[in-house]
Image (tube, helix red, strand yellow):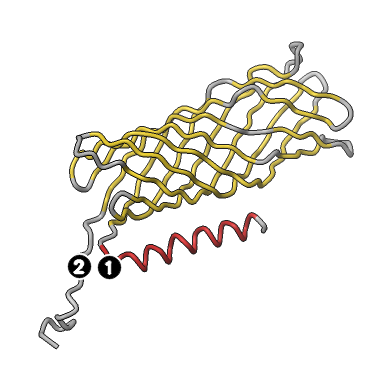
Amino acid sequence: MTIAGLLVRGTSLAFFMGLFMSDAGAQYYLGGQAGWTGLPYQTDTIEGMAAIPVSFSAGYNLGARGGYRLGSWRFEEEYSYRHNNVAEYGEANTGVNGNRHTHSIMTNVIYDFILGWPVSPHVGVGIGAMNVSDHLSVPTSGTFFNDSSWQFGYQAIAGLRYEINPYLALDLDYRYLATTESMFKIPNTRLYYRTGDNTNNFVASLTYLFPPSPPIDPLVTPSGGAP
């Protein structure tokens, strides 16, 4: 299955489940998020030639999400952007600088443990697609890398939610977001290098929950009278 097909099926499933469950008391929501992103040590591998270690500075993430809550379950679509600058490229100081950044579109399913406390824990998983971009420059040679690649993405989610009031919630999450391996072209050659972008993320989000629709009474007609 292609990445586009996976996204269409995931989004369609979330949408139709929302329509199906809306009469059962689903509460729709929108939220914004931001936080810290760590991209661990990676290796850029040129097939049959070299393996170049790359380290990255701490970075950041920004995003938005929307979905619906039904009891303890949340079903959502999430967009997020992540950015990390190159800290060291190769074992010697080569003067390489640049960044690795991603745009991701994920379909998430989250389960809230309702314990009657002010703060409730939750866990979840997500699948989708990520556009991974590598932006590198080598001042000594004038070489400039700027390539991107769409990849399958998946994430694990664990966190805490504090409901400020019935319509506003604060989430603090840890999210491990990973992709299949990306392949980028080396400028002015026929060579490619393979690399990864598996990140650790601490994310804070503020979510607005729309008032739930009142349950439909089957004994009352739309005009308000009895059948």
The answer to whether 221 appears left or right of 152 in the picture is: left
The mark that comes first in sequence, 2 or 1, is 1
Image quadrant in which you'd find residue 164:
top left
Spot occupied by residue 218 in the image (x, y as percentages of width and height)? 19, 78
Give 28 or 220, whichever is nearer the viewer.
220
Q: CA distance from mark 2 to mark 1?
A: 6 Å
- Considering the image in quadrants, where does the C terminus appear? bottom left
Query: What residue do we see at 66% from left, 38% from top?
Result: 133
* Displayed quadrant of residue 89: top right
The disc placed on residue 215 is: 2
Q: Quadrant of the N terminus?
A: bottom right
* The furthest residue to the bottom: 227
Q: Quadrant of residue 205?
A: top left
Decide: is 176 above or below 11.
above
Residue 216 in the image, given as x and y percentages of width and height:
20, 72
Work out whether residue 43 or residue 158 is closer to the camera in this orientation and state it. Answer: 158
Q: Mark 2 touching mark 1, by CB under 8 A?
A: yes
For residue 23, which numbered disc appears in the image? Answer: 1
Q: Could you tell me residue 5's position as x and y percent?
A: 62, 61
x then y, percent, for residue 72: 30, 49
Q: Secondary structure at mark 2?
A: loop
Q: Secondary structure at mark 1?
A: helix
Q: Residue at x 36, y 50 (%)?
A: 74
Q: Classify 10 Å Cα crowding around label 1: few (below 14), some (14-19), many (20 and above).
A: few
Q: What amino acid type should be assigned to the residue bearing mark 1?
A: Asp
Identify the amino acid type marked 2.
Pro
Q: Disc number at residue 138?
A: none
